Amino acid sequence: MRAKPSYLRSRRYRARTVGLLAVPLVALTACGNGGGGSSGTGTAGGSGSAAASGGSYNIALVSDLSGAFSSVSAPGAAGVEVAVDNINANGGINGKKLSLSVTDSQSSASLALSASQKAIAGNPLALFMLSGSADAAAVGSLAQAAHIPLLSPALSDTSVYPAQPYLYQPSLTAQQDAQAMYAFVKQRDGSLSGKVVDVAAINSPYVQLIITDVSKLLKAQGAKVNAAQQYNLPLASFATQANAIARDKPNVVLTLGSTDDTVVVSKALTEAGVSALQVGIPSGAAQQTLQQIDSSKYYALTADPYSSETPSFLAAATEYGKKADVSGSIFAMSGWVAVYMLADALKQCGAACTGSQLNAALQDVSGLTIPDGVSYGPVAFSSTSHVAVGTVRFRSYDPATGKFSESAPISVG
């Protein structure tokens, strides 16, 4: 689907569920034909056919719309909703609309799992999960058992390296974050021999993978990487850890956190007298985050431009009542990217698409240019790669000029 947005009307085909009760795992064995007229036991023949029946493709979204992780996940969910509305307003796909159900997992691991169980029990053709709280491995196993493609930036690297059926990463992996950070530091500082690198990081399995991968790359070039100063949420102060980092006199500090805590960490480093280059990950790349950090020494990577730099996308979000939800967040763009990758696969798969057929079609999404420039480069899946993104840039904000800037493109394919 490469049509430009139509702003004539907003078509909403979704139901919201908030505050789920737990859905027993055994319920998944009763998915059956879901009223679609096909036989089956919740696997491809049953759930896939039902999901594509009638006048719409039924898809589901589980996201932290409230709670501690909502600052990251909620904009991504809004991006999904805007993309769905935009596709439907432009006539849908293969004569069908996208019917989206949305569930708030409330930044709770237990609710994220029960929400995903309930979504899968509803026989969607595909499932999006934008949830920092989710047990992605458990949800991925459920989706695989039900033959339902899962598109989620919350997937662990072990879920996509090597590629596994039905599991797709529409944004950056931890390995790609590490590759990008290493390439950027090397680009900025040239030789890394003898350079001191400190790490300020949230306690997270995903972030730990980044630390492990980037440390190996930096050490191989002669850099000294000190033990990470780690913390848990909520983070009231990072002063003690910042002072410890200041004593190391680092050349680079990797700030690996989410949105609000990255501001606390970066400001604490500055107050402690750390003048080093600070390098962050996508969760610290939002425009508001960079402005609150208020330092020209801080850079964070992203695979997508800001919504303010893509007027067509922002106009669509405004038309569909989501402007405030997507403004300034690169994760809103990730939601849009994920839906358009699914749309491209559905277009190939046809009107009677099943989950198994959609899985095969997703692997043929190759060199896709996302509508309205909502990606720094083409995105693609293949039978051997279920990771979409291949190009990133690093973003910064200069308080002296009040302007944002971006680095040259960096390949992480």
Image (tube, rainbow, N blue to C red):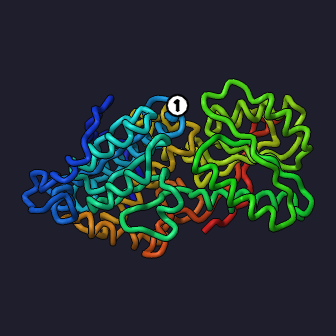
Question: Would residue 320 be seen by someone viewing this image from the given angle?
Answer: no
Q: Secondary structure at mark 1?
A: loop
Q: Residue at x 80, y 36 (%)?
A: 295
**Mark 1 surroundings within 10 Å by alpha-carbon count, few (fewer than 14), some (14 through 19), many (20 or more):** some
State left or right for residue 309 relative to residue 3. right
Q: Residue at x 63, y 41 (%)?
A: 203
Q: Examine the image and state in which quarter residue 13 appears.
A: top left
Rendering coords of residue 43 (x, y %): 21, 62
**Who is closer to the viewer here, 25 or 401?**
25
Q: Residue at x 16, y 61 (%)?
A: 46
**Who is closer to the viewer here, 114 or 38?**
114
Quadrant into which the C terminus falls: bottom right
**Who is closer to the viewer here, 125 or 174?**
174
Q: Residue at x 24, y 51 (%)?
A: 58
State left or right for residue 404 relative to residue 330. right
Rendering coords of residue 308 (x, y %): 58, 41
Q: Is residue 234 above or below residue 309?
A: above
Q: Amino acid at mark 1?
A: Ala
Residue at the bottom extreme of this rendering: 383
Rendering coords of residue 103 (x, y %): 33, 37
Rendering coords of residue 41 (x, y %): 15, 59
Question: Would residue 391 be seen by someone viewing this image from the given angle?
Answer: yes
Residue on which disc 1 sits: 68
Residue at the left extreme of this rendering: 37
